[in-house]
Image (tube, grey):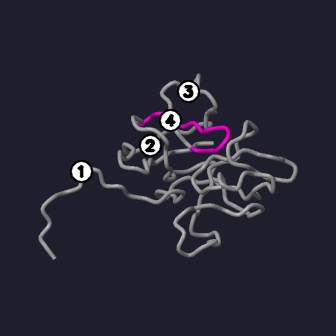
Amino acid sequence: MAFQTSIAADIVSGYIGELSHKGPMRAIPARIAADATQANCLVGRAYTYADEAAETVRPGGTGQFAGILISPKSYPRQDLYDDTLDIPLNSIVQLLQMGYVFVQIASAGASIGSSLVYHTTTGALDWTDTPGTPPSNHALVPNAIIDRHMPSSATPRLALVKLTN
C-alpha cells in the first residue's frame, strides 16, 4: 500500500435518512399508501398524508406535510445486495417532523440557511432561497432549513437539515 499523497477537500459524512445528532426530536409512525408510486418510496424523501383518517402517506403530494422518512436501517431489505433505500408499499415507517437529519438534495448551490422544498410528484428534496415562491412543481417543507454544514458538492449531494415543526 502506498503512502497517502492527497487529502479530500469535500468529506461527506452521514447517511441519507439518519439522524445527525441528539437534540429535540419528534417522529410519527405512518403507513405508506397502497396506491403510492413504489419507485418514489425512498428514505430521505418528503411525505404528505394520502388519508389522514387512515394515517397513510405518500411521497410528495400536495396534502398536509407528514415528515421526512428516516431510519434506513430499520426496514427489511428487498435484496441484500441492492443499495437503494426503497420501502415496500403498506410498510409502517417513521417520519421525522422535528430534528436534524441527513438528506440528499437535487441541485448544487445551497448554503446554510437555505429553505428546504420537495417535488410534489416524487418527494425528492431540494432547496430555495425564496421560500415564498418555491420552484414549479415544488412545495415548501415547513420550518426546515439546511443547517450546520455546507452541503457536499459530490453526488449524491448530502445535506444536514433542521426541521422545527
Quadrant of residue 84 in the image?
bottom right
Cα separation between marks 4 and 1? 23 Å
Magenta span: predominant SS is: loop
Cα separation between marks 4 and 2? 12 Å
| Nearer mark to the viewer, of 4 and 2 | 4
In the figure, is residue 42 to the left or right of 151? right
Cα separation between marks 4 and 3? 9 Å
| Nearer mark to the viewer, of 2 and 1 | 1
Residues at circles 4 and 2 in contact by the CB criterion of under 8 Å: no
Residue 121 belongs to magenta span: yes
Q: Crowding near pointer 1: few (<14 within 10 Å), some, many (20+)?
A: few
At x 64% / y 71%, what residue is drawn? 78
Is residue 153 placed above or below 13 in the rendered structure?
above
Cα separation between marks 2 and 1? 20 Å
Is residue 4 placed above or below 147 in the rendered structure?
below
To which residue does mark 3 refer? 131
Is residue 67 placed above or below 142 in the rendered structure?
below
| Secondary-structure class at tag 1 | loop
| Nearer mark to the viewer, of 4 and 3 | 4
Amino acid carrying label 1: it is: Ala
Amino acid carrying label 3: it is: Pro
Amino acid carrying label 4: it is: Trp
Give coordinates of residue 124: x percent, y percent: 58, 44
Most foreground residue, 23 or 163 = 163
Q: Which residues are magenta?
A: 112-124
Give coordinates of residue 38: x percent, y percent: 70, 56
Label number found at residue 147: 2
To which residue does mark 1 refer? 9
Quadrant of residue 144 in the image?
top right
* Mark closest to the chain's N terminus, 3 or 2: 3
* Mark closest to the chain's N terminus, 3 or 1: 1
